[in-house]
Image (spheres, coloured by chain):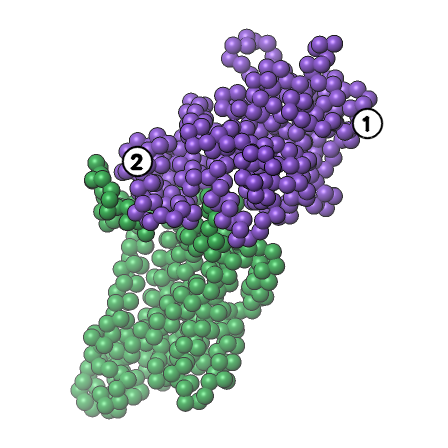
Chain colours: A green, B purple
Amino acid sequence: MTDLSDQKIAPKVAQKSRLRVFLDSDIYYTFRRSPIAVISTIVVTILVLSAIFAPLIAPTNPFNPASLNLMNGFTPPMAPNAFTGESFILGTDDQGRDVFSTILYGMRISLFVGVAAVLFAMVLGITLGLISGYVGGWTETIIMRIADVQLTFPSILVAMLIFGIAKGVTPIEYRDQMAIWVLIIAIGLSDWVQFARVVRGATLVEKRKEYVEAARLIGRKPYAVMLRHILPNVLSPVLVIATISLALAIIAEATLSFLGVGAPPTQPSLGTLIRIGQGFLFSGEWWILLFPALTLLTLALSVNLLGDWLRDALNPRLR
Amino acid sequence: MSDAVLSIRNLSVEIPTRSGVVKPVDGVSYDISAGEILGVVGESGAGKSMAGNAVIGLLNPPAHIAQGEIWLNGTRIDALKGEAMRRLRGKEIGMVFQDPLTSLNPLLSIGDQLTETMLTHLPISRAEAGKRAVAALEEVGIPGAAERIDSYPHEFSGGMRQRVVIALALCAEPSLIIADEPTTALDVSVQAQIIALLKRLCRDRGTAVMLITHDMGVIAEAADRVAVMYAGRLAELGRVRDVLTQPQHPYTGGLMASTPLASAGKARLHQIEGAMPRLDNVPDGCPFHPRCTYAESKCRAAPAPQISQNHAACWFPLMAQKVS
């Protein structure tokens, strides 16, 4: 934004680096003092990195049929297979796929769907919330009543409905490819209301402040006032909701996949893995279910705790 | 029209409410010429700010201009809409708000806010705008302007922030500044500085100023002429010296008598009995008559006379009574 710095006369006070500013900030201070925040950040970072670098970390590619050996099926964790003598850290499933590898690949899909769905919900919710808060009148009434109506349905039901409609209109041969994107849109559409409500509320507060009137007065167009002046000032609650929504979106995706309407078996997410695994629970192959479920739990819990901490840290009243 | 920068003619603002139409501004007329500071005084709810908002076109619905005309540099602006209004008011009118805490965007550096304003209205490059921003800050007396251009509002004190707001109001070279209680939120020691600054800059540039305040001291200090408002109407309009030393309207007289003076011993401060009428219940006749010690039956029956230069909106002006 500023190219003022080029022609600035050499400042008397040495400018702090951005890192220094961050390290000196209140938010970093409260972060360092909260063991829960530190631990959950470390856990989330490890999980996200291992999901991103799954192809490098995973011992096998579970979706390459050539690398699978059906003889390896149902190998328990940490024990050599009775026929081949091969050993797998978390065991294998019925088709001899390494559970550890399927979890890494599954987490990739879960995280991708979660993040993309939250981004989609955020963009949609922030846009509609800003507009209804700033413009008011009929626009606001219509948008917020739609939001209210949607809130009366459980969000998983909304997501299933959208998923079902989308599945109905896509040709069969594209269904598996489209499934991930449909999932993102379905979860995103079921989650935008939160963002819209919070942004609208914060916009109503900011709109009354004189700097917004000043911006209108100097003749900025409404969209410029909204994007440049109001939006940055309403973002901190959005950040909190986005984090908590991420945990919810990951769980929603797992739920949909568990119910069999989400990620297809060819691109299994954690939810799909849990669905596959629960079939073997009563025949004694507990590891196929347990490890994906534990991973999902850890992921959702860490993200959620991080969101909780962020909410407290950004709330001036709780300091 | 006259050569005034701003001319308000018979302006009325109305707000429709459940209990009927309320008129926070009712038939107000005044002019401000270039380089002149017009003080607008009155109690809370007298319509001073509402008239200012009507001029800049920032009346919040359902408030609207019901009648009257507003002329700015010979252009009628009260009926302008959308794009034309945006362009004109941004370029020609600057605004200094009451609270410097909220009138600057907390997340933009003051340099960004200054350049944004200039780039919106002046045909200059970004680099040029940056230079002018530094010059503008120097002009309003911010020490080390070049270093502080990238600072954020929270890094300034209240008085300094108000200086920035003044720089912001002046940087697009407007012909009119509306200052709505610019010193109310400041320390008394800083108030005088800010008023002096506003006065000097507007003199130098020939900018007309509408100075809205309830502080008679500020008016006495800064304004050339003063408009006293009561219940949405003009009570008195005239040169500051005349109005302050020889108020004609009993309300102005009351206001003057109730201004505390450090030199005024221990005598109890004068107060005007009663309160300003609710705007949905303005009495017939002269709106001030229930509180006026000089009121007679004529005041209750007939609306106060039309105001003119050196003539208050009163049937029995104070001067006349003293003479008789």
Tell whether A181 sits left or right of B269: left
How far across and down, in percent of the image, does residue B115 sit? 37, 45
How far across and down, in percent of the image, does residue A5 sit? 26, 46
Residue closest to the far top: B265
Q: Residue at x 51, y 44 (%)?
A: B89
Q: Secondary structure at mark 1?
A: helix
Classify mark 1: residues with Cα within 10 Å, few (<14), some (14-19) or many (20+). Answer: few
Residue A217 visible within the image: no
- Is residue B256 or residue B249 the one in the foreground? B249
Q: Which residue is identified by label 1?
A: B301
Tell whether B312 sits left or right of B82: right
Q: Residue at x 48, y 69 (%)?
A: A189
Circle 2 chain: B
Tell whether B297 sits left or right of B75: right
Circle 1 chain: B
- Is residue A47 or residue B310 the one in the foreground? B310
Classify mark 2: residues with Cα within 10 Å, few (<14), some (14-19) or many (20+). Answer: some
Q: Which mark is residue B145?
A: 2
Tag 1 or tag 2, which sits nearer the N-term?
A: 2
Q: Residue at x 49, y 57 (%)?
A: A130
Residue B126 visible within the image: yes
How far across and down, in percent of the image, does residue B190 sit? 42, 25
Q: Secondary structure at mark 2?
A: helix
**Tag 2 and tag 1 share a subunit:** yes
Q: Which mark is residue A99?
A: none
